Amino acid sequence: MKDWRIYCEFSRPFTLLMPGVGMICGGLAAWGAQPRFVSSWTHSPWRVAWNVVLGAVMAVVLNAGSNGLNQMFDLPIDRINKPQRPLPSGRLRSREAAGFTLGAFVVGLLLAWVINYQCLLLAVLAGIFTVSYSVPPFRTKRWGILANITMAVPRGFLLPVAGWSTVKTIWVVEPWLLSSVLGLFILGAGTTKDFSDMEGDRAGGCKTLPVLYGVRKAALLISPFFVFPFLLWAILVRLGKLTGHPAGIYTLSFSLPLIGAYIDYRILKNPDELSASENHVSWKLIYLMSIVAYAGIAVSYLLPRP
């Protein structure tokens, strides 16, 4: 029996925080949306809370499976870029990695099924994009901007909607408009992890934006995605499309671009630093920014209305 810490490392626990937070905040936003404090699935507030927590666990487990799948098919690349990881270092065998990954996907989908059919539908859809990103013959990770889209859909566009589905129906426009902003943010921000992987990606035939265009041009291409998507929330509030507290959403819509502008400054000032370190400060700021965005939306929807 392998040491559980190896499986924990294989799951990449640092990356599991955001999907859990995103699910919870999506559920809280739905709870505060019109009609307020009403669920499409149950009259019991305790059942609502249970669904939201279960959804967070589901997102964490599925994301662990996604991380495992990606590492399995990235093994030749990780031997170059990240030889210290469990698979390329030999601390975890391929069969053990496959068992963990399959188990995570099965458990995650079962949890989604327990919540409701809409959550299951979104989980399956996210799984399709996840498989398409990593697994041949699709393996969209090889194809530049298509890789960004394939990653942004499950982690940006679908995640908040899945959180919403734990409380209210998704067959309304509001959760999709809300999540579109986060999807656009992830569409650009997802590239930051590719800068430090250029050597292995190039050898493995993965034409990421930094490989295709070089460090400086790729940094310039993704810079607008750290600022402009969040301004859309203010426009959507103005148009009456979002039912959260207007002041809360306006505050979020205008403050997050300031953080994004600082990230742009750090990236564009010396883009070569991104390719020199896997844990560049900009990546940490992006992760923090995502969590602040999710939490800010939840608070904005739960605030008392004027």
Image (cartoon, rainbow, N blue to C red):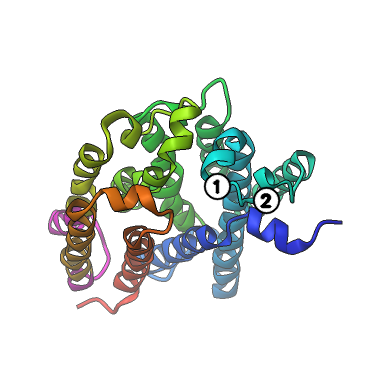
Report whether 26 appears left or right of 242.
Answer: right
Q: Which residues are magenta?
A: 230-248
At x 32%, y 43%, the residue is 187
Question: Does residue 5 appear in this view?
Answer: yes
Q: Badge 1, how many Cα within 10 Å: few under 14, some, many 20+?
A: some
Vertical position of residue 38 compared to residue 82: above or below: below
Q: Which residue is disc 1 drawn over?
A: 82
At x 31%, y 59%, the residue is 282
Question: Does residue 181 appear in this view?
Answer: no
Amino acid type assigned to the residue bearing label 1 in the image: Lys
**Front residue (pair 132, 41):** 132
Residue 86 is tagged as 2
Vertical position of residue 148 compared to residue 107: above or below: above
- Residue 284, percent from left and from top: 38, 63
Direction top: furthest residue = 137
Q: Secondary structure at mark 1?
A: loop
Q: Is residue 239 magenta?
A: yes
**Front residue (pair 111, 48):** 111
